[in-house]
Amino acid sequence: MSSIQSQSLGQRLLCLPLGDRVKRFLDYLTVEAGLSINSTLAYGRDLKGFLSFCQEAQIDTLERIDLLTIRDYMQALSEQGRSENTIKRFWVAVRMLLRYGKLNGWVQDDFSSQMDTPKIWQRLPRICSRNQVMELIHSPNEADAYFLRDRALLELLYATGMRASEVVGLTLQDLNLKIGYLRCFGKGRRERVVPLGRAAIGAVEDYLKNQRPELEGPKSDRYVLLSRTGRPLGRIEIWRLVKKYAIRAGMPRSISPHTLRHCFATHLLSGGADLRSVQEMLGHVDIATTQIYTHVDQDRLRSVHKQFHPRQ
């Protein structure tokens, strides 16, 4: 986390009860646990709501939080009409804070383990057909000022399943186009190597040769995807570009860079890729996270059933 972001978040939290403990917890997540800036900021936002609840309940120290406090907080979130996903996310943030408190001797017992994690329905990701993805990728044309860069971006997202935040950090050193691989740093700075297909290699080479030199500036720092000012392309700009070309291709407005990650995984599995390989390419720590894509690919399930069921 940058010093400006950390200081700003810390100042906001210190105005609330328990703010000092929470600030130390957020520093721990960044410095020792290795969480990304965005993940740490998300924990801070979620805990800010809990601190406000504690303030209203006149709970001013971590030691005074008990099991009843947590249950009342969960009940309050439910009465506010918060979604099940939001309640679970808030619950995880509070649980992690209490575990950190026990680690530092601020609380005697991590009683959060006595409570069941809120159960939610698993939401299946939105995916697009192969034809839709191809239309999206070919949406940039020569009338667009940076169409070579934009096409390379779309090809990279679909060819590798990288998150937008991972594409932002991609440097020229991370690319090995001769053998068709790239190096990617995911959540917690975990490194993984992902292969590239011919189409993605061609699009990236075309961009690097014919457009990136025009964009390069003092702030480029060897990053692959650059904005018109020569700075690395940001997450918001990547999101905006994907949305722009999705609309042009006649796709739903809800399409985002993460949709291409879902498409990458689902299309690989439907083509016969094994689950472990897809897990490695996505950078999932737990294979259960990857298994959701097996529920999405209904066509493959039907074909497997037809091929192997004895009563077909």
Image: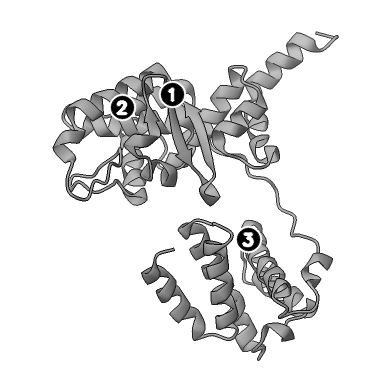
Query: What x and y, as percent, mark residue 78?
Result: 68, 68
How far apart are the two marked residues, 3 and 1, measured between alpha carbons?
34 Å
Amino acid type at circle 1 is Leu
Secondary-structure class at tag 1: loop
Q: In this view, does 25 lie above or below 311?
A: below
Q: Do the residues labelled 2 and 3 touch (CB within 8 Å)?
A: no
Q: Mark 1 points at which residue?
A: 196
Secondary-structure class at tag 2: helix
Q: Are marks 1 and 2 in contact (CB under 8 Å)?
A: yes
* Viewport quadrant of the N terminus: bottom left
Query: What x and y, as percent, mark residue 74?
Result: 70, 71
- Looking at the rendered structure, the number of numbered marks drawn on it comes to 3
Query: What x and y, as percent, mark residue 70?
Result: 73, 75
Amino acid type at circle 2 is Val
Q: Name the residue under label 3.
A: 89
Amino acid type at circle 3 is Arg
Position of residue 193 in the picture relative to residue 89 (left or right): left
Q: Quadrant of residue 113?
A: bottom right
Q: Considering depth in this image, is 301 or 96 the residue closer to the camera?
A: 96
